[in-house]
Image (tube, rainbow, N blue to C red):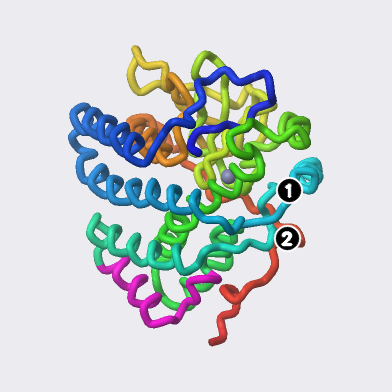
Amino acid sequence: MTGAQVRPAGQHRYTALTTQTPASLLERAEARWTSIGANQPDLVPAIALQRLLVTRTIQTVDRLDGADRPILSLEPEQAAEKLRAGTPALRGEPVALPVAMLSPLVLEACDDLAQGGAGDVARRVRGCLDEGRIDIGSLLVASFDRNQNAIRLKAVHEVIAPDVLWLTAELAVGPAAYVAQQTLFATAGAGTHPALIGALAAWPHGYCPACGSWPAFGEDPDRSRQLRCSFCGVGWRPRDPGCTYCGRHLGHLTSLQAETDSAHRAELCTGCGAYLKWLDLPEPTPFELLPVEDLASTPLDVLAAQKGFGRPSLPELGGPERYPCQMEDPAR
Ligand SMILES: [Zn+2]
Ligand SMILES: [Zn+2]
């Protein structure tokens, strides 16, 4: 279970990637890293860190695929109703995360980031977790639910780096979000559930219909555009041609290419100051390898940043589904 996309039946234009195994994914990643490192030697340290993180993601998805307890019990019909109301399907759902399996991954991600350049900043986050000052189960649930405010508040209270705490939790729980969205949207690789096809096609937002995160990038193979979620990996078609983030019309968008002969481009919005990369890839990227393609297209990020554009922070969706949790309570 790797690359099934959210796509109405009859519109499957891509080769299904259901034959991927952990070994073949890793092999594919290694080939990409070799090529990225050869073309962009300054990215070699970033590749070394990414190798650790992506390898763990591949193993975690494989372990979660083999687990028999479902992460959430949302019916496709209920999910379709949420989508029609503009709420990402996984938001606010009670989740049964395999905390014992995922908790060590948060700590390992701290270690990797510490080694990979974050140093003491990441070691302090790990120390805080080791001392039990943060309940890792609550942290994972808050991250699954994309509750950035709760995680930020807790980190500030503990005087540790909010971004590192957010990232390490995201790395650990992302595979569970991927497995959850696959179970909901594309059961056993059978394509999008019929109850969800219409609701997904009508999804008007630039944020992910499953988890509410912004896309990591858009994929543009064959001019068949789809956005890919940076957290859970869902692929969905943008409904409107305007800015993915603020919805402003095409007049606010300009396009940027890192190399003249490349079909990769960044779409810059003068309305909100954000950019989105559109990558000309031959097929949809397996969930596990999304960070690899993101890294490979770093020249576009550099260029967009030089022009003063950035990636926006998580959309603030609010709403009653943002239940208060243990993470938000500053009193211990
Ligand atoms: Zn998502
Ligand atoms: Zn915009």
State if disc 2 and disc 1 touch (CB < 8 Å): yes
Whether residue 299 is in magenta: the answer is: no
Q: Position of residue 233 (x, y in %)?
A: 52, 40
| Magenta range | 120-138
For residue 302, above or below residue 137: above
Q: CA distance from mark 1 to mark 2?
A: 9 Å
Q: Main secondary structure of the magenta part?
A: helix
For residue 147, above or below residue 287: below
Q: Amino acid at mark 2?
A: Glu
Query: Label 2, on which residue?
Result: 321
- Disc 1 secondary structure class: loop
Question: Residue shown at 70%/57% (left/top)?
Answer: 318
Question: Residue shown at 52%/64% (left/top)?
Answer: 98
Q: Position of residue 311 (x, y in %)?
A: 48, 42
Question: Residue shown at 30%/46% (left/top)?
Answer: 50
Say the numbered circle drawn on residue 87. Answer: 1
Circle 2 residues within 10 Å: few <14, some 14–19, many ≥20: few
Q: Position of residue 297 (x, y in %)?
A: 36, 31
Mark with earlier residue (1, 2): 1
Compare residues 192 and 89 and report the one nearer the observer.
192
- Disc 2 secondary structure class: loop
